[in-house]
Image: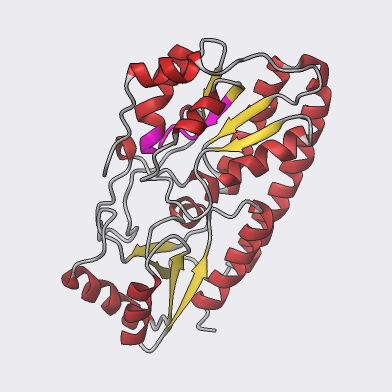
Amino acid sequence: MKRFTPTLSLFLLILANCTTHTSPDEKPTVMVSIAPQKYFVQQVADTLVRVEVMVPAGSSPETYEPTASQLKAMSKAKVYFSLGLLEFELSMLKNIQKQNPNLLLVDHSKELNLMEGTCDHDHHHHSHSHSHGHDPHVWTSPAEVKVMVNSIADKLSLLYPENAKHFSENAIAFTHQLDSLHQHIQAKLANTSGKKFFLFHPALTYYARDYGLTQVSLEEDGKAPSMQHFKSVLQKAKEQGSTTIFIQREFDVNTAKTAAADIGGKVEVIDPLDEDWLNNMYHITRMLHKALNGE
């Protein structure tokens, strides 16, 4: 996996050519790594802040490299909410903070119940390389999202104490929605414990953990699968009678179609990075329920 290694001169050049002064009417800028985090911040802050996302739609968070314009925008931010698990975060955020000493850098990974980066959770472990060996897809777990949301409210309250009550009330309201989502998923998947679902890239690791499912990935170490691995996964699918293979929007749909055709199945596209996070989680749950029940 290619790493992003910006030089010190690039940072100095960027910072020298941009101003950190804002007009009284300009909203504070909050930086996040991925689109679901933007949703979380907006649930807490409403329209009181402007949220900038580092990884654009259609890009993979695990291979993305920020642009110079994004680094420039970073100099105006008051806080960066980082997952702390993506390659570009690990390679650049400490340097960014050195050049922006007033930036509050929040590393959510220090607060969460992390999992090792494995693709197959039924003891046939096919290693999938993630930063520090931890799977980064923490935003697919309502329980982990609740931790992040409370942290977002706390940190924004420190920065903007005049709005602390607003942030706290919004965070409480959203955690109630998270509880409702959790109860919905539990009820929807009540009879599917231990069942396998098959997808190209292992993006639902934490979801699978929380709801007793087994995620089987067609990908190997972030690469297209070998024929041996391909056949192994297909055999598992046939043994279970599964006919659905899931694929994310940013990956090669043709590979998934080939795999599905071999078992007389179908491909379903999901997007764990959808900015409309809450509705998307309900949608993913409906899709998994259908697949796990042979519909």
Q: Does the magenta stretch include residue 289?
A: no
Q: Classify 114 as above or below 240.
A: above
The outermost residue toward the left is 228
Horizontal side of residue 196 vs 282, given as left or right? left
Q: Residue at x 62, y 51 (%)?
A: 275
Q: Quadrant of residue 5?
A: top left
Q: Residue at x 72, y 53 (%)?
A: 180
Horizontal side of residue 94 vs 164, given as left or right? left
In this view, the residue in front, 83 or 206, is 83
Horizontal side of residue 275 vs 233, given as left or right? right
Which contiguous range is marked in magenta?
Answer: 80-88
Q: Whole-percent x and y of residue 33?
A: 51, 37
The outermost residue toward the bottom is 264
Quarter of the image with the C terminus in it: bottom right
Q: Whole-percent x and y of residue 265?
A: 41, 85
Q: Classify 2 as above or below 282.
A: above
Q: Quadrant of residue 241?
A: bottom left
